[in-house]
C-alpha cells in the first residue's frame, strides 16, 4: 500500500553511479527525478492531511510502486473558500529534459459523499481524454491508472491513520499546463486542455527512452482504436512536414514522431498491427535503417560507407564514384555525389529499409512503404506505394 507521513527533512533524488560497465572512466552523474504522478500523489497527501487534521505538513513522504520513499517539500498550501484544501508540489525531473520540469502540480481535495471513495477531476492545465485507445476512457481526466492507484492508496493509508472516512474528490491542476501540453503528444492523442498525469514507477530516469517509446505505443493504440488503416512514423519534424504534403488527407493522430526508435514502432506493430505503415526520414537515418539498425541515434548506429559504396556499385556506379562513396565523410556527401552522377542511390536505400522493417514486424501482415527526404525536406525517393 502507498503510505505517507510528514517528516522533518528532504530526501535527495537518486543518482546514477557514473561508472561504465567493465570499470571504465566515470561518466557525469545524472540525477533522477519524479513523475507528475508522484508529485500529484505527494500533493494529494499534503491536502488530505490538512483536510483530516486542519494542518498542512511542510513535507511529505510517499511510497512508490517499487518501494522507494521520496520526500517532497510542500510548495503551496491554501484553504479554499468552500473549505477544500489545496497543496502543491514543484516537479523536479532531475537531469531529464522533461517539459514539465518545474511545473507546479496542485491537488485540491473536497469531502465526498459517504462510500464514494476517491474520485478524480481534471482541473486547469490537466487534459481530458477524448479518443479511445488510451489507458483511460474518453471523458475522463488524463490521470493514468498507476497515479490514480497511488493517490487512492495514499488516501486510504492516511484515512486509517487519522480516523477519516477517506471519501474525497481529488482535483489535479497544473498552472500553465495547457501551454506545456502543446509541446507534448497530447493534442495528437486526443488529450485536450492540458498535460497528462503520468508514471508507472514514480521515477524519471535521466535521458531514458521509456517515455518516448511509451508515446509511440500509445500513438499506435489510438490509431487502432479510431479505426485508422495506416500509421506514419517520422524521424523528425522535417520528414513529418514532407509526409503531410505527400499525404494531405492523413489525420494528425496517424502521424507518429518515432524519432530514432524505428524498432520500437515496428516491434509494437508486430503484436498490435495496422494494415499499413509508412516511415519517412532523412537520407542518413534511413541508410542506417537500411543497414539493419532499428535504433537510429548517432551514438548507437552509424552509416557504413563501405556498404553504401557496394549498394551504389550494384546500381551502376563506376569505380571512381564507388571509391569516393567509400571515402565519404557524411551521408549527405554520398547523396550529393550520386545526384551529380545521375544515380538514384536513395531508392535502393528505401527498399532495403522496407526489408528491415518487414523483418521486425513479421509475422504481422503490415504493408510497408518508406519515403526518403533530403536535408531540405524534399522527397528524393519512395517505395511503390507512395507517389512523390
Image (spheres, rainbow, N blue to C red):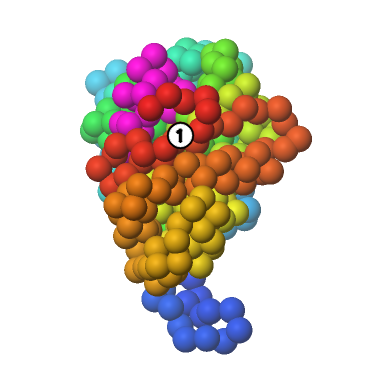
Q: Residue at x 45, y 66 (%)?
A: 319
**Number of marks in the rendered image:** 1
Classified by dominant secondary structure, the portion drawn in magenta counts as helix
The answer to whether residue 165 is above or below residue 103 is above
* Residue 150 in view, yes or no: no
Q: Position of residue 38 (x, y in %)?
A: 47, 45
**Residue 315 among magenta residues:** no
Q: Is residue 376 left or right of residue 224?
A: left
Residue closer to the observer: 343 or 212: 343
Q: Position of residue 194 (x, y in %)?
A: 33, 27
* Disc 1 residue crowd, few under 14, some 14–19, many 20+, Cα 10 Å: many
The answer to whether residue 134 is above or below residue 75 is above
The answer to whether residue 278 is above or below residue 21 is above
Q: Quick one: quadrant of the C terminus? A: top left
Q: Quick one: quadrant of the N terminus? A: top right
Q: Residue 47: which quarter of the image? A: top left
Q: Would you name the residue on which mark 1 appears?
A: 382
Q: Residue at x 40, y 53 (%)?
A: 284
Residue closer to the observer: 131 or 75: 131
Residue closer to the observer: 231 or 9: 231
Q: Position of residue 45 (x, y in %)?
A: 46, 40
Q: Magenta segment, which residues?
A: 236-255
The answer to whether residue 174 is above or below residue 374 is above
Q: Is residue 35 left or right of residue 376?
A: right
Q: Residue at x 55, y 41 (%)?
A: 351
Q: Residue at x 66, y 43 (%)?
A: 360
Q: Is residue 363 left or right of residue 131?
A: right
* Residue 185 in view, yes or no: yes
Q: Position of residue 31 (x, y in %)?
A: 41, 65
Residue closer to the observer: 195 or 183: 183
Secondary element at tag 1: strand
Amino acid at each position: 500500500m502507498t503510505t505517507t507521513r510528514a517528516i522533518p527533512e528532504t530526501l535527495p533524488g537518486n543518482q546514477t553511479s557514473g561508472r561504465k560497465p567493465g570499470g571504465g572512466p566515470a561518466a557525469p552523474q545524472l540525477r533522477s527525478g519524479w513523475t507528475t504522478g508522484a508529485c500529484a500523489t505527494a500533493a494529494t497527501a499534503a491536502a488530505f492531511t490538512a483536510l483530516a487534521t486542519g494542518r498542512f505538513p511542510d513535507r511529505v513522504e510517499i511510497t512508490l510502486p517499487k518501494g522507494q520513499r521520496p520526500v517532497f517539500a510542500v510548495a503551496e498550501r491554501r484553504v479554499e473558500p468552500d473549505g477544500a484544501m489545496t497543496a502543491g508540489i514543484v516537479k523536479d525531473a532531475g537531469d531529464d529534459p522533461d517539459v514539465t520540469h518545474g511545473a507546479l502540480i496542485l491537488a485540491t481535495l473536497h469531502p465526498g459523499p459517504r462510500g464514494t471513495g476517491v474520485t478524480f477531476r481534471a482541473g486547469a492545465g490537466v487534459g481530458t481524454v477524448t479518443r479511445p485507445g488510451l489507458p483511460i476512457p474518453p471523458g475522463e481526466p488524463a490521470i493514468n491508472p498507476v497515479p490514480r492507484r497511488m493517490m487512492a492508496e495514499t488516501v486510504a493509508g492516511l484515512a486509517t491513520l487519522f480516523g477519516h472516512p477517506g471519501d474525497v474528490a481529488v482535483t489535479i491542476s497544473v498552472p500553465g499546463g495547457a501551454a506545456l501540453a502543446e509541446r507534448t503528444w497530447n493534442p495528437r492523442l486526443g488529450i485536450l486542455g492540458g498535460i497528462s498525469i503520468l508514471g508507472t514507477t514514480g521515477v524519471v530516469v535521466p535521458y531514458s527512452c521509456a517515455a518516448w517509446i511509451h508515446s509511440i505505443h500509445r500513438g499506435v493504440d489510438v490509431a487502432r482504436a479510431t479505426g485508422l488503416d495506416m500509421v506514419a512514423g517520422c524521424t523528425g519534424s522535417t520528414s513529418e512536414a514532407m509526409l503531410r504534403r505527400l499525404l494531405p488527407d492523413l489525420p494528425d493522430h496517424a502521424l507518429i514522431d518515432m524519432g530514432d526508435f524505428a524498432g520500437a514502432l515496428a516491434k509494437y506493430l508486430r503484436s498490435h498491427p495496422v494494415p499499413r505503415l509508412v516511415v519517412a526520414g532523412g537520407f542518413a537515418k534511413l541508410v542506417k535503417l537500411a543497414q539493419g539498425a532499428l535504433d537510429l541515434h548517432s551514438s548507437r548506429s552509424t552509416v557504413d560507407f563501405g556498404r553504401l559504396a557496394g549498394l551504389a556499385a550494384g546500381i551502376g556506379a563506376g569505380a571512381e564514384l564507388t571509391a569516393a562513396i567509400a571515402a565519404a565523410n557524411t551521408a549527405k556527401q554520398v547523396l550529393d555525389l550520386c545526384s551529380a552522377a545521375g544515380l538514384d542511390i536513395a531508392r535502393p536505400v528505401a527498399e532495403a529499409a522496407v526489408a528491415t522493417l518487414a523483418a521486425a514486424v513479421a509475422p504481422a501482415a503490415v504493408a510497408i512503404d518508406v519515403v526518403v527526404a533530403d536535408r531540405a525536406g524534399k522527397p528524393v525517393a519512395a517505395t511503390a506505394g507512395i507517389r512523390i
